[in-house]
Image (cartoon, helix red, strand yellow):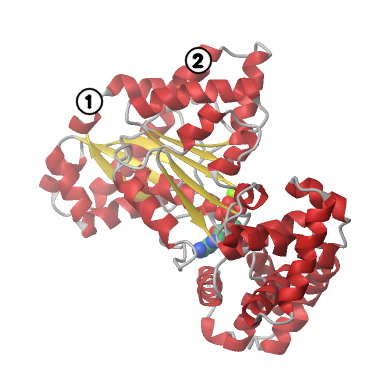
Amino acid sequence: MVLTLDQKNKIWNAVLSQIKTKITDRNVFDAFIADTKIYRIDGDVMVISTGSKLSCQFLKSNDHYLSLIKDCLKDQTETEYKLSFISKEELKDATKVVVSETKSSFFSSCSLNPKYNFDNFVVGGCNKEAVQASLLVANNPGVSFNPLFIYSKSGLGKTHLIHALGNYIRTNSPYKKVLYITTDAFIDEYVKFSRGEQQEENLKDFLKNVDVLLVDDIQFLSEKVKTSEMFFNVFNTLISNNKQIVLTSDRHPNELKGLEDRLVSRFNMGLSVNIKNPDTTTLISILKTKIESNGLDLKSFDEDGLLFLAENFSKNVRELEGALNRLLFYTINIKHVSKIDLSTIKESVRPMISIKDKSKTITENQIIETVCDFYHLTENQIKSKVRTSQIALARQISMYLCRLLVGTPFDKIGKIFSRDHSTVMSSCEKVELLLKTDSQLQGAINTLKKQLKS
Ligand code: ADP
Ligand code: MG
């Protein structure tokens, strides 16, 4: 909810009056609390400006007065805000505040979601690097790793992490202007101004005025030539002014198609981190976190039931969450059971698993993606002319699996890999021959098949 200055003042005056009636030491009120105001509200974080650095320090570190303020604020607003304090000295740059508040009509559909933070993001081997890099950037925005580029397949936590990073900066550096936008929203705003509904300069100024720009799903910029041009311009200005940019994407910058090379090379300037498929232990920890955040008792859930969920929804945390939601709905509303064992879990998510099985038609792209993941290669490498033994083997395996699992004709496989019909044929034959004797290859192909069919 966006409040006018007048509404903010009204709320705060009521809070101050209530504090005054509850406080025992009037001197504390006069010295540290009387001269406070609401500076900004970002989701569930309320930033309070204080009269001096000393009062800022006092309020930050004094739990008693902090909870007194929170209680009074809750009485007035029926909302449990997290409080963050900033002194007037730190707010000297008043003009910047005016600019950022008056132009907030841009990107009205986007805002940071307070429910995503670092505390409820489970860290495992699959995302350790991405979390470490995000924390480093959140603690020192604009100082290193600029831009930070987070990429992964869908449902593995990119959006959660970029929001966590933004929320962290807003709480710990409240004077920094953080803007979270989706690439779709950026394209929409751009289209509005090309229709003449707003001026390009205003939009550019607005973007160039932020301290931290978070852009989700940058792959959607592909083929949007004009929008990309403007983004390039904003990007360069922000980076050269040491403003932080964080981007997420469903693939590595080098794999982004339909984007100009100059933009891709800018994306590669900072640090790119990948989130991989989570292992079972991480998935179980995620499940446990979600169960607890729903206010439920973990003891009611059998461990082997959680293992069953983690193994059957291992590729996408969003799907795993969907399965958990279904389970909770089923057990609470339909079965009215309090103990959730393996058979209850299987019964509740059975429709989801059978839908998954039915919808499981393997495609050539999935094969290439899975083989690339397995051998730590990129799609470009596997499709290139490079003939180093590992890349060549991964390429031959991909061709073989396309033939085996999808039944793709040789010439179609040839087109995918820019090879002729006979090269594809001999690659497939080579894999078949090797499979008879090479146990390592047998293991690799079995794992790949399992991953593709799961
Ligand atoms: P992406 O943007 O990569 O498609 P999201 O960030 O939308 O994925 O994640 C999908 C869901 O999974 C979200 O509800 C998110 O909270 C949850 N999620 C993903 N990874 C984790 C994790 N490591 N810990 C906790 N929740 C996670
Ligand atoms: Mg996302």
Q: Is residue 399 left or right of residue 45?
A: right
Question: Crowding at label 2, few (<14), some or many (≥20) Cα neighbours within 10 Å?
Answer: few
Question: Residue at 52% across / 53% down in the picture?
Answer: 160
Q: Is residue 106 left or right of residue 36?
A: right
Say what secondary structure mark 1 lies in: loop
The amino acid type, in three-letter code, at marker 2 is: Asn
State the image coordinates of residue 109 (x, y, percent, origin top left). Answer: 60, 35
Residue 394 in the figure: left or right of residue 125: right
Answer with left or right where residue 105 lies relative to residue 239.
right
Which residue is more in the foreground, 362 or 371? Answer: 371
Quadrant of the image containing the C terminus: bottom right
The Cα atoms of the two marked residues, 2 and 1, are separated by 24 Å
Residue drawn at the location 31% of the way across and 19% of the way down: 95
| Residue pictured at 65% horizontal, 19% vertical | 192
Q: Is residue 386 visible?
A: yes
- Mark in the foreground, 2 or 1: 2
> Is residue 116 or residue 215 the one in the foreground?
215
Q: Is residue 100 visible?
A: no
The answer to whether mark 1 is within 8 Å of ligand 1 is: no
Q: Mark 2 highlights which residue?
A: 202
- Kindly identify which residue carries mark 1: 92
Disc 2 or 1, which lies upstream in sequence?
Answer: 1
Whether residues under marks 2 and 1 lie with C-beta atoms below 8 angstroms apart, the answer is no
What is the number of callouts on the image? Answer: 2
> Looking at the image, which is closer to me, 391 or 36?
391
Image region (quadrant) for ligand 1 = bottom right
Place of residue 330 in the rendered image (x, y in percent of width and height, measured from the top left)? 73, 76
Secondary structure under the numbered disc 2 in the rendered image: helix
Look at 78% across and 55% down and name the residue there: 423
| 362 relative to 241, above or below | below
Q: Quadrant of residue 154?
A: bottom right
Look at label 1 and name its amino acid.
Lys
